Image (cartoon, helix red, strand yellow):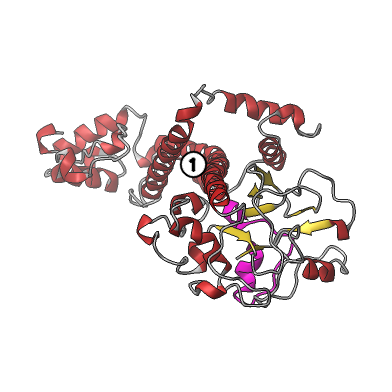
Amino acid sequence: MNPRERQSPSASVPPNPAGDRSPEHWGIELSSADAAAIEALLAQGLDAEACTHAHGERARRCAEILGLLGCVPASKLDEALIDATILRVVQARRLETEALAPVDDDALEALVEAGFNPERCPGGVRRRASEHAELLNALHVDVCPVKRETLVGSTLAMVQSRIDVEDQRRSLAEQPRWRPSMRVTDLVSVAALLLITGVVLTPMVGAMRGVAQATSCQAGMFGAMRGFAAYASDYRELLPMASESSAGRSWWNIGKREESNSANLFTMVRASYAKTSDLACPGNARACRSEDRAKADDWSNSDEISYSYQNLFATERPRWTQPTTVIVLADRSPVTVRAMRGEWFNPIANSDNHMQRGQNVLMNDGSVQWLTNPVVSRAGVNTPVGSPMGADNIWLPQALEEAIARFQSPTHARPLSGTESPAGATDVFLSP
């Protein structure tokens, strides 16, 4: 094969933005003459002597190179071995979308919920959680607290870039590159090995992506917390409000300042107490992150909203600082998202922002917590729930909670009407 007949890298493949130096990004392709010789060689079952005179010399050289892989003419291959290898490839493809083993998935979930401390995990998964922790500890680097937020952002951007490159590479690998008549056992075995490797790595990448999004979401909530504190300092410890927000009025007409609870939260952006990026969760792909919207009254639609805010359409409202600690902000409520579409909903579902694994919440004392259940004690998040009437569902007003409590283990309820109000300053009801 003549190297001068190969196309230049810039002519075949665009530069790789991630800086990947792997061979598939070098952009080298066969010349038209070499490609024709390969096609002729494959058509003759890798027998160079049977090729036409026009391709004879090049086909012979190609056969010599393929001979380094241990290839033989198709007539000498073991058909049973070929069929068995292809069957293994098919089985590997079927396993491609499988997740971690249930026990490993539970261990990883428990480790995240325990703040990556395996000693706090349940005894049944503690050993596996410790093994996960050892693997994750290899990624630990001591960072100056001042630079932590910048480092988290750049690391997440790099992780997402590598994930995008891997997704593109897998998409290209799935495209047919060989004629059906080609049966080279060594190449098929390599393909099977790559598929099996993908099955092992994909669940881990997905889990790490979820952890990264939850961590970035917490960083954004801390930015919102600073905005709440600054607003409260300027407005006698009140929570941000855009209108009178009278009890009984509609509160889910997004875009209408007088009829939208989300407009109350958007006051933070409009008054320059927070940035739109502080109120955009990484788990919401359609979240509004443009600073050009800073002078608007509200988000343009519900899909742009990442967080649910304490419903202020009430006669009594909580303050930023008060004796009772309550939740004032959380990942977007799955209840109001479905209720606004007129659908039935699961009242104890977790937020869709993090694939219903849980939700980050911001308390009116400035702390941020991760909840795996939207039902908390009315006395505080860390207090055990004693009875159904002593529990507070952060997605619903107290009146609707009491109605649902009459049912045993409710999994769905009728839609909200959009005019409900919290029962008081300690009744957490986040919307929309």
Which residue in the structure is indicated by mark 1? 195
Count of numbered circles in the view: 1
**Is 394 included in the stretch rendered in magenta?**
no
Q: Nearer the viewer, residue 422 or 72?
A: 422
Give the quadrant of the N terminus: top left
What residue sits 66% from the left and 66% below the top? 335
Residue 313 image offset from top left, x and y in percent: 65, 69
What residue sits 49% from the left and 24% below the top? 143
In the rendered structure, which amino acid carries the disc numbered 1?
Leu
408 lies above or below 222:
below
269 lies above or below 396:
above
Q: Nearer the viewer, residue 238 or 204?
A: 238
Residue 42 image offset from top left, x and y in percent: 29, 45
What residue sits 37% from the left and 47% below the top? 168
Estimate how packed mark 1 is, as few (under 14), some (14 to 19) or many (20 or more) residues with alpha carbons within 10 Å.
many
Name the quadrant containing residue 58.
top left
Q: Is residue 52 visible?
A: no
Residue 427 image offset from top left, x and y in percent: 75, 60
**Residue lying at the far left of the rendered structure:** 4
Q: Is residue 242 left or right of residue 384?
A: left
Q: Is residue 21 left or right of residue 259?
A: left
Q: Nearer the viewer, residue 136 or 268?
A: 268
Residue at disc 1, secondary structure: helix
Q: Is residue 308 left or right of residue 197?
A: right
Residue 278 image offset from top left, x and y in percent: 48, 49
Q: Is residue 146 visible?
A: yes
Q: Nearer the viewer, residue 284 or 264?
A: 264
Which residues are drawn in magenta? 330-354
46 lies above or below 232:
above
